[in-house]
Image (cartoon, rainbow, N blue to C red):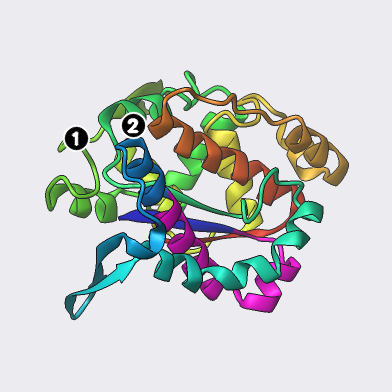
């Protein structure tokens, strides 16, 4: 299980196939290629047409399964090949084919939550701190939807307890939990460019002390987002969140929506 997200740039592959179908096909290709790679590492040498796997489809009405070969899955994803050449001129400058679609695997490990929360501002006397407190109050991001998933077991989160950050404010202590942060990221629907910009600021993709006047200025905002940087992480679980943070900056810079499918 995973969170799928798409940087909706309106490119030729997205318009030709449709975003929903592109995601479905690319997800199938990722599954088939990953399974084949793991089997090759384990010494499996049969061709994909002779390797059978059982797929389980999880739907609200219940799970269903089907047996297929890896070649079946690769063939199902073949329509991607007809549009893949357009990715060489990706309007977002993404580095590989269909990189507009990424996945974040469940369950989220505990150390990933810790890494993410450490990216929040260390003090409220910054642009990020002030806007974060304001947003929590105005939009009611209380973390309840995430907490419900966490309480259901270990499917979505490794830790049964959310991480928290506390600041001393003028009116007392202010706290935020990782449940609230994940709600802001993945449980508010599709992310408009302004929301991506705020998340990029809150999570240090652009400096926490970036002037609010700079953010309101088109040229200044574009320059700040162009300079945004989240280093690559050797830890694969952290890297999948880091990749999402990079996508926030790209979406805000290009004024594009990030489509979320959790």
Q: Is residue 5 depicted above or below 73 in this figure?
A: above
Compared across the picture, whether 66 is left or right of 14 comes to left
- Residue that extends furthest to the right in the rendered view of this protein: 219
Q: Within the magenta stretch, is there residue 36?
A: no
The span from disc 2 to disc 1 (Cα, nearest Å) is 9 Å
Q: Residues within 10 Å of mark 2 (few under 14, many from 20)?
A: many
Q: Quadrant of the N terminus?
A: bottom left
Residue at left 61%, top 31%? Answer: 205
**Residue highlighted by disc 2:** 113
Q: Please provide percent x and percent y for residue 231.
A: 59, 24
Q: Is residue 80 visible?
A: yes
Residue at left 56%, top 26%? Answer: 232
User: In terms of secondary structure, where does tag 2 sit?
Assistant: helix
**Residue highlighted by disc 1:** 159
Q: Please provide percent x and percent y for residue 186.
A: 42, 53
Residue at left 28%, top 34%? Answer: 109
> Which stretch appears magenta?
7-33
Q: Which mark is residue 38?
A: none
Q: Please provide percent x and percent y for residue 118.
A: 42, 22
User: In terms of secondary structure, where does tag 1 sit?
Assistant: loop
Q: Quadrant of residue 175?
A: top left
Q: Quadrant of residue 255?
A: bottom right
Compared across the picture, whether 109 is left or right of 19 comes to left
Marks 2 and 1 in Cβ contact (< 8 Å): yes
Q: Nearer the viewer, residue 89 or 209?
A: 89
Q: Within the magenta stretch, is there residue 20?
A: yes
Residue at left 33%, top 31%? Answer: 113
């Amino acid at each position: 299980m995973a969170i799928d997200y798409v940087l909706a740039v309106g490119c030729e592959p997205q318009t030709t196939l449709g975003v929903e179908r592109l995601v479905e096909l690319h997800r199938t290709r990722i599954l088939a290629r990953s399974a084949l790679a793991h089997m090759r590492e384990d010494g499996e040498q049969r061709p994909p047409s002779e390797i059978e796997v059982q797929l389980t489809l999880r739907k609200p009405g219940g799970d269903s399964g089907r047996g297929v070969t890896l070649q079946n899955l690769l063939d199902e994803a073949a329509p991607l090949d007809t549009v893949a050449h357009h990715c060489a001129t990706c309007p977002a400058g993404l580095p590989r084919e269909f990189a507009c679609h990424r996945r974040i695997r469940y369950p989220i490990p505990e150390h990933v939550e810790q890494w993410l929360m450490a990216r929040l501002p260390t003090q409220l006397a910054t642009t990020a701190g002030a806007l974060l407190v304001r947003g929590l109050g105005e939009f009611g991001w209380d973390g309840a939807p995430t907490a419900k998933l966490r309480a259901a077991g270990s499917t979505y989160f490794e830790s049964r307890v959310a991480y928290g950050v506390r600041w001393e404010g003028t009116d007392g202590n202010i706290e935020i939990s990782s449940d609230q942060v994940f709600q802001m990221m993945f449980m508010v629907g599709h992310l408009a460019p302004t929301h991506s910009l705020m998340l990029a600021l809150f999570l240090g993709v652009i400096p926490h002390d970036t002037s609010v006047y700079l953010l309101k200025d088109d040229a200044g905002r574009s320059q700040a987002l162009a300079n945004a940087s989240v280093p690559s992480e050797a830890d694969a679980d952290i890297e999948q969140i880091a990749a999402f943070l990079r996508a926030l900056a790209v979406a805000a810079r290009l004024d594009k929506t990030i489509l979320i499918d959790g």
